[in-house]
Image: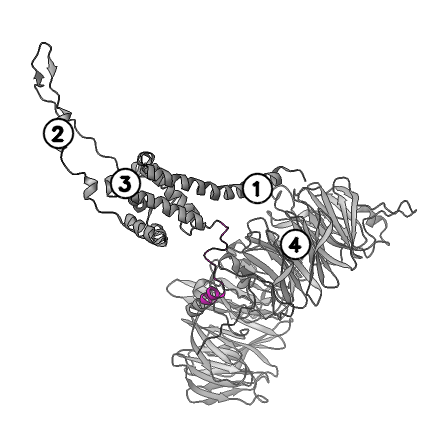
Amino acid sequence: MFNVIMPAPSKIFTGYRALGFVSNHVPLAVRYHQKHKENYVVTCVGKCFHTYNCSKLGIVSVSDSHPEDISVLAVDRDLTFTACRNVIRAFTRGRQVIHVYEGHTADVHLLLPFGNHLISVDVDSSVIVWDIKSQGQYSEIQFNKTSFEITTVTHPSTYLNKILFGSKQGRLELWNIKKNTMIYSFKGWGQPVTVVEQAPAVDVVAIGLANGQIIIHNLKFDETITKFLQDWGPVTTISFRTDGHPIMATGSATGHIALWDLEERKLRSQMREAHMTSVSGMQCLPSEPLMVTSSADNTLKVWIFDLPDGGGRLLRNRSGHSAPSTKLRHYGTDGQNIVTAGQDSTMRSFSTVHDKHHKSLGRASYNKQLSKKNTLKYDEHKMPYIVDFATEQTRQSDWDNILACHRGLRVVTTWNYVKSTMGQHKFDHKRFTKNAAQHMHTVAQCVEITSCGNFGLIGYSSGHIDVYNLQSGIHRGSFEDHSGEQAGIKQAKAHNSHVQGVVVDGLNQLAISAGREGDIKFWKFKDKKLLDTCKLDSTVSKILLHRESSMMAVARDDFHVYIIDIDTRKVVRKFIGHDNRITDMTFSADARWLITAAMDCTLRVWDLPTGRLVDCFLVDSAVMSLSMSPNYDFLATCHLDDVGIYLWANKTLFSHVPLTALPSNYEPQMIEMPTTRKHTAEDVDEDIKEEEEEFIRAEFKSSEQISHELITLSLLPNSRWQNLLNLDVIKQRNKPREPPKAPKAAPFFLPTVAGLEPKFAVDDEGAGEGRNKGKVQAGNLMPLCTLGQLLKEGSSKSNYDKVTEYMKSLGPSAVDVEIRSLAPEMGGSVVVMCNFLQFVQSVLQTNKNFEIIQAYLGLFLKVHSEILSSEPEVVKELEKLSDLQSTSWCTVQDLFNQTLCLVNYLRTAVL
C-alpha cells in the first residue's frame, strides 16, 4: 500500500502566524498559579486561546488550533477547557490537548469545572457531567428547552454537589448532580437570566437580568436582599471585589461598567466607555484592587481601583484593531515592522519579532486636544478611516514620515512613526477652499512619499496632483498638463479624470501618475513638466512602482495587470488570470515576483522574467491588502472583515522549490489560514517530512556533467584543496612553540692540533660519509604508497577513475603526503611520476573536477621541481600537459574576460 502525498495548496508560501488578535466575544477566564504566585488570564481568539500574565499582560502561551472557532472557555487549577461545536477539549500547560469529551448532539455553550468533574451544557439544554480523567460520562440531565432553556450555570459556595441553573424563561433551579434530583426551584423575576455570580458571602448570589436589573438574592431563604438597575441594557458580566471593599462590578452591552456599593446599596462609580462593544468578560483578581476585562473590540484591559470616587483607572492595556484592516505595508528595510490602517480610524505597527514591540500610532482626529476630552465611542472629532497611506524611513527622526488619505475626505494627514502619534500637518490646497461648491465632492485618492523623505505627493479625484514639503508643510507645486492650450483649452490639472495612483522613482527625477481613463503620464519631478503619455485601452484602478528595477505594475478594471518599464515607457508584460477586482499588489525585493490579490479570493504569484504564473491559491476571505517583506522572508496580508494580520513564510528560503509555470487550466486550492501560534519545525510530522523529501529528490536529480564542453567543478569544499600550496606555511604557523632550552655547555679545554700555529680540532665530515658509504638508500627499502599503486594500475588499464575517487576522499595533509611519496627517495620512481602527469592529462580531457586537479598539479610541481627538470621522460610528459592545459584554460579565460567586460560596462556606462 502506497501513501499518496497530496501537493500543498501553495508551492511558495505556507502559513506562519497571525498578528493583532487579543480577544473576542467569548468571556475570559482567570486562574491563580500557586507556585508562581501569579494570576493568569485566558482569552479566546477564534480557533486558539491565549494565556497572559496579569502583571505585565505578556503572552505566556498559545494553544493548538481547533477545527473551528471556540464557543466557550473554562479553567480549573491545572487544565483549560474549551468547547468547539459539540466537542470539548482539555488542555494542559495552555497548549496541548490531553482529554477529549464527545457526547453532545448540539453545540456546547456553557462549561463549569466542578472538582474532579466537568459540567457542560449545550444549546438544547442537555447537561452532561464528565469525569475529567477517565473522559467518561458520570451523569446526564435533559431539560425541556421550551420550559427551561439554560443560560447560566454556577456552583454556590459550600453547597456540596449542588449546581444552580438559570434559564431564559427567568426561573432558576438548584440541582444535586450526584443524585440527579432537583432540590428547589426559584420562580424568578419575569426576565431572562443572563449571568449568575457567587457573592463573597455564603448563600448569596448576584443575578443579572436581560432588562438591566441586578438581584442580590439569598438562596437559603429564597429572599431578595437588594436590587440594582443599570440603564445600559442587559447585564453581561458580574464580579465582586475581594480586597476588603464591598463593591460589585457589572458590565453592560454598551461597554459601560457600573460599580455598586453593597453596604450603602447605591451606585458608587461609573466607568463609561470601558470598551467599544459589549463587556464580554470581567473578573476581579482575588485579594487585589485589580480587575481584568475583555470585549469583542479586541482589547484586554487591567484596571486598578485607586481613584477618589472608587472608580477604576486603566493600568495596562493590550489591544489590536477593533475593526477590519484596510491597508498594510512593511516599514523600513529590515522587514520587522508592519504598519496597518483599520476601519476604526487607527494606525498601528505590528512587529514580526515579538509582541512587546507592537504599538499604536493613535486615532485620526480633526483636533487631538478636543478628542482627549471626549470618549472614544462618541468622539465628534474622529476622522474617517484611512484608505491609503505611504511611509518612508529616511527622515523619520526629523519630521513626519507617514502620509495618509481618508475615506471621503479631501484633507490629507501626516503621522510620525517615531513619536507614535498623528503629525502636525493637514494638507488641503487653497483652490479647493476658494471654490468650495465646485470641489464639494473632491476627495484625496492616493499619496506617495519620495525616497529622500522630503516631499509628499497627493492625487485627487478632481485630477489634480499636488506636492508638499513634509517638514514645513508648504505647497511646492502642482503637476499640470498644458498640452491642450494650443487648441484653446487650458487644462490646469494633471488628469481629466480621477487620479488612481502617483509614484516617484528612486532619484526624484521622474514622477508617474495614472488617470482613471487609462492615461499613464510621465513627469519631470523638479520642473513638473509633462514628458510623455502612455494610453491604455482600459480604465486603471491602481499602480505600484518598484524603484530599484524601474518596473511599474498597473492594475486595470478588466482584471488584467500590465508591467510598464518606466525607462522605455512601454508595456513589457501582461498578466491575465483574475476573475474579479484586483485589491492590491506587491513586488518581491528583487522584482522577480509580482504578487496580486483580488476579490475572487485568489492570491497569484507572477514571475516577471518568464511572464508566467508560478503559484496560485485560495483563501477563506478576500485579501484587501498585502506586502512582501524587504528581507524576502514573509508575506503579510489582511483580509475582508478580519481584524488580524496574517504572515506567510517563503518556503524558497529554506527548501528547494521548483518554480515551474502553472498550466492555463490550473484550479487553485484552498490554503489553511495561519493561527496566532508560530509554526516551527517541531510541529511538522517527521514521517511526512521524510516522504516529502524523498518525493522532491525523486522529482529531479542533477546529472554529473551537463555537457562535455563545459568546465565542471567538484563538490568538495574549498578547505580540501585551496590551501594545498601553503600547507607547509600553515603547519609552521600552527606549530606549538617549544620552551627555551639552556645552551649546551662548552668543554673546559678545546682540542687543538699540533703545529707551528695553534688550530682547533674539527671533526672530519668525510669520515661520516665514509661510514655511510656502502649503505643502501632508504628510499629503495620503502614500499610504494597507495597513490603510486593506483597510478600503476590505472596506467595499465588507461582508466584513472579510482585515482580520482581516492584523491577526493583524502584531506589536505594526506594529499600532501601521497604526492611527496611519489619521489624516488620516498619509495616512488620516475615512472610513477610520469603516470601522475598522465593522470592529470586524462582528467583535464574530461573537463571534470577542474579546480582540484589544478591544485594537485600545482602541489606536484612545487614539491618535485628539481627532479622534473632533470629527467627527460618527465619533461616529455610535461610538454604534453602544457599544451592540454593551455587549451582548457584559454576557454575558461575567454569566458571570464567576456563576463568582466560586460560587468565593467554596466557599472561605468551612463544610461
Q: Nearer the viewer, mark 4 or mark 1?
A: 1
Name which residue type carries label 3: Ala
Residue in front for this viewpoint, 471 or 322: 471
Image: 557 above or below 206: above
Q: Which residue is mark 1?
A: 898
Reading the image, the residue beneath label 3 is 823
Tell me the SS state at disc 1: helix
Residue type at numbered disc 4:
Lys
- Residue count near mark 3 (Cα–Cα under 10 Å), binned few <14, some 14–19, many ≥20: some
Callout 4: few (<14), some (14-19), or many (20+) C-alpha neighbours within 10 Å?
A: few
Which of the two marks, 1 or 3, is nearer to us in this view?
A: 3
- The quarter in which the C terminus is drawn is top right
Q: CA distance from mark 4 to mark 1?
A: 68 Å
Instruction: State which mark lies toward you, 4 or 2.
Output: 2
Could you say where residue 473 lies in the image, as x and y percent from the top left?
Answer: 72, 43
Q: Which amino acid type is shown beneath numbered disc 2?
A: Gly
Q: Which residue is mark 2?
A: 770
Q: Secondary structure at mark 2?
A: helix
